[in-house]
Image: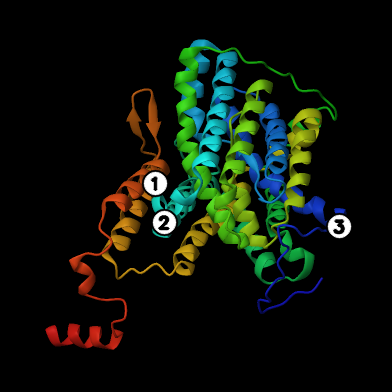
Amino acid sequence: MRFHLKHKERPVIGVDDRVSTAKAIPLALQHFMSMFGSTVLVPFLTGMSPSLAIMCSGIGTILYLLVTRGKIPSYLGSSFAFITPIIVVGASMGPEAVLGGIVVTGCVYVAVALLVKIIGTAWIDKVLPTPVIASVIIVIGLGLSSTAVEMAFFNGGYATGGPFVLNGFLVAMLTLIVSIVFSTCFSGFWSTIPVLVGIVVGYVSAFSIGLVDFQPVIDAPWVGLPTLMHPTFNIAAILLIAPVAFVVIIEHIGHLMVVGEIVGKNYNSMLPQSLLGDGLATITAGLLGGTPATTYSENIGVMSATRVYSTQIFWYAGAIAFLVGGFCPKIEALINSIPVCVMGGVSLLLFGLIASNGLRMLVAGQVDFSKARNLMLVSAILVIGVGMECVGVKIPLGDYSLPGMATAAVIGIVLNLILPKDTSQDDIYPADIDKKDVIENCTDSK
């Protein structure tokens, strides 16, 4: 192991590259642990089975890789967009009706994938140009920042009125610093698992100061079988749950584009396969008792931090999730014992990397901010999206609610379609203006 005071550019492990099993397992564990907290939070809030959610996330990820022929590195976990309708349907119609709605939701993904396959993907660049999609990606990252701060500063207790937790905050900062140091100052294999190292160091430090309850780990059996559930189909439940699919589809397109930006590939042509994989994963979850699937920002952040893009790692991560969620309660309990503040420290880095990749897309796309329409598009999307996500505001639409990310995306799409490409304001500071002249003009005006 070598430590460098000065950052050394790390080699990229590409999408099609392969590593040894000894290296693949810790890399996969890193992805598994990064998605774990969010994936189990959704069933925890909705009264569904965390074990089945983990197991189905593994199955869903493997299905996704099969459908996309191992060309798109992504992990599928529980979608937060469905929390409200699942709670409503579960309370009034039962969990089986929820699962029926989830199955139909997956069918909506499949139908949209078929439609995109028929009409093509040329519309993406027109409807979702770089200023729009990059801004939505920034919203995805910064919109999650309040969640990361709550986890790191309040050990997850802010929403319930909990106080600032100093010990938890210090553990979160240690986790964050260790992750950053291993990502930027180490070379070789250690630089590819900074998140895993950060979590391990954070966990040990949290355990040493009494923030870890290890009793559930001791009590949990080594081997256990999941209790599967099966759907029933209720039209009212379907009408409450299935339409949320369109919100997740917008998020899915954003995730696919940021993955392409990170790995240096254009995945527009593979959108039908990507949506189909997500749809089959969601259908499978509904048939077994799991939660609706979506591609995960946390794992995109891991790829950005590590420069490891190999889909081989996601095969391993999916297999680990399948085994842990379905057959090994003790390991599940061990992962579940990781304090919220530790995952908060990691999330501060991962969610920030999502936003940073949106900024990088704006730069790489050479978005001209001397154009008034670009300036207005980005400004509206960022303020509306980040503001709504951080405050937790959602727009009620009958039995549904539109979150900030989706609202910002819809507004950005509409503005992009109706705003003129050139405006009178573009003549005030054209793109090729000399900065020195601007300064001198401003000075003269005073």
Residue 3, by quadrant, is bottom right
Residue with the most extreme front position: 118
- Residues packed near mark 2 inside 10 Å, few (<14), some (14 to 19) or many (20 plus): some
Image coordinates for residue 143, horizontal then vertical, percent? 44, 48
Which residue matches tag 3?
A: 20
Residue 401, by quadrant, is top left
Which residue matches tag 2?
A: 129
Q: Quick one: quadrant of the N terminus?
A: bottom right
Identify the amino acid type marked 3: Ser
Measured in 3D between alpha carbons, the distance from the residue under mark 3 to the one under mark 1, in whole angstroms, is 41 Å
Is residue 241 shown above or below 269?
Answer: above
Determine whether, in the image, residue 371 is placed left or right of residue 124: left
Identify the amino acid type marked 1: Ala
In the foreground, 318 or 326: 318
In the foreground, 376 or 211: 376
Is residue 285 shown above or below 194?
Answer: above
- Residues packed near mark 3 inside 10 Å, few (<14), some (14 to 19) or many (20 plus): few
Residue at point 66%, 76% (across, down): 7
Instruction: Report the disc number at residue 409.
Output: 1
N-terminal of the pair, mark 3 or mark 2, is 3
Determine whether, in the image, residue 407 is placed left or right of residue 150: left
Residue at point 49%, 52% (across, down): 141
Q: Are marks 3 and 1 in contact (CB under 8 Å)?
A: no
Secondary structure of the residue carrying numbered label 3: loop
